[in-house]
Image: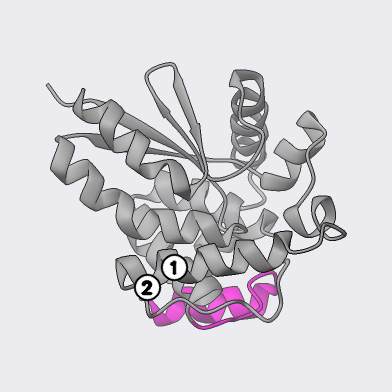
Amino acid sequence: MGKTVEFIFDFASPNAYLAHCILPDIARRTDADIKVTPCLLGGIFKLTGNQAPMTAFGEIKGKLAYEALETRRFIEKHGLSQYRHNPHFPINTLLIMRGLIAARRMGVEGAYTRAVFAGMWERGLKMDDPAVVADVLTEAGLDARALLDATQDPEVKAELIANTEAAAARGAFGIPTFFVGDEIFFGKERLGQVEEQLAA
């Protein structure tokens, strides 16, 4: 019986995009399932007192430059040439994260995730603009009106809040965070450890 890796997830994080690209290969190698848990990164920050790296490390000489270097190395190692930094970053992802929960309920989570990730981290679009989001979803063959309308469903809103609160209560302080059983791993740099834990 395979194990499960839980992926605490928000489209807002470029590192979540990069992890998302290679996590399926890890799951295949270890006969594991991936459980994606949509959360709000800003909500996790608020609940834990954490800050975005630009804020937390902005005054530390060399820190952000090193983060950029590490990202370039990761991209090159895994051949993720489609990635591009979004010029509108940071983007408020409340709409598209609610949309992910709605898409799951409608049975189109995979197509929705691919389309939104491409808009965010491949095409560099302003994915907090409802008109832009609608265009992206329509281009992907999805029912943009139904999905965007569903983002206003109180149950969808409540599920995203509950996920975020539960993740923070469990120990998550940022994204991407992974759980294998009760073991927590933070950051795309820990994916090797995630794979080792799944294979153990």
Q: Residues within 10 Å of mark 1 (few under 14, many from 20)?
A: few
- Report the span colored magenta: 123-140
| The N terminus lies in quadrant | top left
Point 74% across, 54% down: residue: 53
The picture places residue 199, in percent across and down from the top left corner, at 19, 29
Residue topped by disc 1? 73
Residue 49 percent coordinates (x, y): 82, 33
Q: Which mark is residue 7?
A: none
- Residue name at image x 63 percent, y 72 percent: 127
- Figure quadrant of the C terminus: top left
CA gap, disc 1 and disc 2: 5 Å
Circle 1: element type: helix
Corner quadrant of residue 155? top right
Q: Residue at x 28, y 37 (%)?
A: 195
Q: Quadrant of residue 65?
A: bottom right
Q: Residue furthest front?
A: 61
Tag 2's secondary structure? helix
**Circles 1, 2 touching at the beta carbon (< 8 Å):** yes
Q: Amino acid at mark 1?
A: Arg
